[in-house]
Amino acid sequence: MFDQATMKLKVDPLIMSALEEDITSEDVSTNSVMQTATMGEVDLICKEDGILCGVQVFSRVFTLLDEKTEVELYVEDGEAITKGQLIGKIRGDIRVLLSGERTALNYLQRMSGVATYTSKMVKMLEGTGIKLLDTRKTTPNNRIFEKYSVRVGGGNNHRYNLSDGVLLKDNHIGAAGGVKEAVAMAKAYAPFVRKIEVEVETFDQVKDAVEAGAHIIMLDNMSTEQLKEAIDYIDHRAEVEVSGNVTAENIARLKGLGVDYVSSGALTHSSPILDLSLKNLHAV
């Protein structure tokens, strides 16, 4: 759950921006049929099985439009929900319920979808000791929501942004002139408390990364046989992360190889939404 400071400083401005995107000047459809304030109630219903995530953000959409709106939810973030389940009720000015509906659902469906897909992949790694990580492949201006959703689904966050840690990827290595050079430069520049992670694509780069003293070696887009060879050579001299098109369909191949971390961009860029709906709106 986001604390109050985070909500006010980071979350509220993003929600307001989303609302302003959807309502340029007025909600013409709603104002056409509802020209005066009328109290109403609507049900939040689950339309497929999954993991719920984003209830705080969902609720905030309505209370930013009208602080008097009452959002009553029967399920918390991280709980499993099933098709047909009544998740909650929202009460307030019908104009607010109608105008906030799509933005609120967009957040809740998207965040629940990420949490559901993450949970699926985490379960596939149970008992292995491997930590599942997300990446920076997030929707612009929605990273705070998507990375939170990964945690709710049981996954772990990699770097939040470029200021968080040193990860030397292929183009950094190209700019520096090689793996050894890049690692040496990072050690000289970055604070000593920072771990140095380097992405490698070949066995020769693995050797260079070990020799240079990288703390974490990311094995990118390698076959299972290449992974075995690389991990045997590293031999616990660095932590091992595997990345590159890792999805629920192929993650099982990484079990039993001695991998410490698996990072998957699919958690945030390819997870489908979880189908949720606001139904049965009526005056009260």
Image (cartoon, helix red, strand yellow):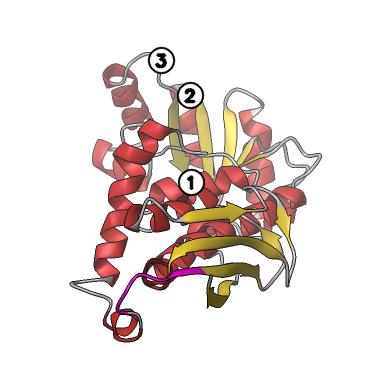
User: Which of label 3 and label 1 is nearer to you?
Assistant: 1
- Where 177 falls versus 195 (above or below)? below
Q: Residue at x 58, y 58 (%)?
A: 112
How far from the left and from the top, in percent, is residue 277? 57, 73
Q: Which residue is mark 1?
A: 147
Quadrant for residue 229, please give it: top right
Say which amino acid is labelled 2.
Answer: Glu
Quadrant for residue 4, please give it: top left
255 left or right, relative to 238: right
In terms of sequence position, does the residue under pointer 3 or pointer 2 come before the other? 3
The answer to whether the residues at label 1 and label 2 have Cβ atoms under 8 Å apart is no
**Is label 2 in a helix, a strand or a loop?**
helix
Q: Tell me if mark 2 has few (under 14), some (14-19) or many (20+) residues whose alpha carbon lies within 10 angstroms of its own.
A: some
Q: Residue at x 40, y 57 (%)?
A: 61
Viewer-proximal residue, 183 or 58?
58
Q: Which residue is mark 2?
A: 211
Magenta part of the chain: 35-40
Q: Residue at x 54, y 52 (%)?
A: 55
The answer to whether the residues at label 3 and label 1 have Cβ atoms under 8 Å apart is no
- Where 139 falls versus 97 (above or below)? above
Q: Which residue is mark 3?
A: 193
Q: Residue at x 32, y 16 (%)?
A: 191
How far from the left and from the top, in percent, is residue 175? 24, 41
